[in-house]
Amino acid sequence: MTDAADSAGVVAINLQLDGLVVLVTGGVRGVGAGISAVFADQGATVVTCARRPVEGSPYPFYPCDVRDDDAVKGLIDAIVADHGRLDVVVNNAGGSPYVPAAEASAKFSSKIFGLNLLGPLSVSTHANAVMQKQDRGGSIVNIASVSGRRPTPGTVAYGAAKAGLESITSTLAVEWAPKVRVNSVVVGMVETEQSELFYGDADSIAAISRNVPLGRLAKPADVGWAAAFLASAAASYISGASLEVHGGGEPPHYLSTTTADIKK
């Protein structure tokens, strides 16, 4: 791994991903687009999938609903047929609208589990079947969330699914070693083109950012760099791990409300 500083003093990192074929599910918008961009900038051949394409996306696109296991198998087969191999999978596709638990139907919750838990398991299973036969094996990175580690009012099924995704990560890392490494990135709050749906307007985002120890929300590329590192040779002895990308986390609420002089 080499690096050099550019004219602005920013370190340019080379993770030596040239020649790798990388699938980023949901890699056409938001966090997924940031992940795709980092891998592409690092020299990887990036392919993406989602239920619907996004106009202007620069990466080869395969339509696929990851909740459909037959469609997922077809996706993996098509990628291998077109590119000859599959080295990295980033299970990024996911999400959930805000619905209080008392109002969420069983059908709704099942769909959320399918997208955020069973979908990544399906993609991983079919990718592993390919990677086990490759000399270099492969790497799977699951995009988990802090929602799987704390209460998530309004997205109960999503939080439970993301908690399950970390469990899947640690189990598959044992079952599929040594040919395939499996890790997860535990993502905090991220500023995307749809941030206002979750965090409000610019003033609201600024206020929320002040509660993050690093003073800002993540950018999609921050998640991308974490995923790219875990997929690279620099992380060759890392498997079954969860890398937290949350800017230091969310300090306990009492710290902003207490009258005690805790700074002494």
Image (cartoon, rainbow, N blue to C red):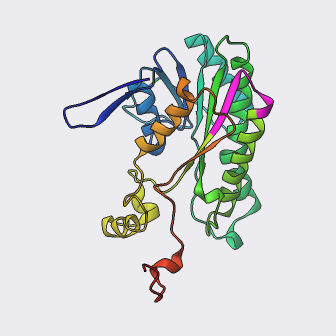
**49 versus 116 height, above or below:** above
The number of discs equals 0
Q: Position of residue 151 (x, y in %)?
A: 64, 67
The residue sitting at 44% across, 85% down in the picture is 261
- Is residue 112 visible in the rendered image? The answer is no
Quarter of the figure with the C terminus: bottom left
- Magenta region includes residue 157: no
**228 versus 84 height, above or below:** below
Name the image quarter holding residue 126: top right
Outermost residue to the bottom: 259
The residue sitting at 66% across, 52% down in the picture is 162
Outermost residue to the right: 175
- Is residue 97 visible in the rendered image? The answer is yes
Q: Is residue 63 left or right of residue 8?
A: right
Q: Position of residue 42 (x, y in %)?
A: 41, 24
Q: Position of residue 106 (x, y in %)?
A: 76, 60
**65 versus 205 height, above or below:** above
Outermost residue to the front: 264
The residue sitting at 68% across, 12% down in the picture is 134
Quarter of the figure with the N terminus: top left
Name the image quarter holding residue 210: bottom left
Name the image quarter holding residue 239: top right
- Magenta region includes residue 180: yes
The residue sitting at 62% across, 66% down in the picture is 152
Which segment is the magenta one?
Answer: 174-183
Q: Nearer the viewer, residue 16 or 197?
A: 16
Q: Nearer the viewer, residue 258 or 133?
A: 258
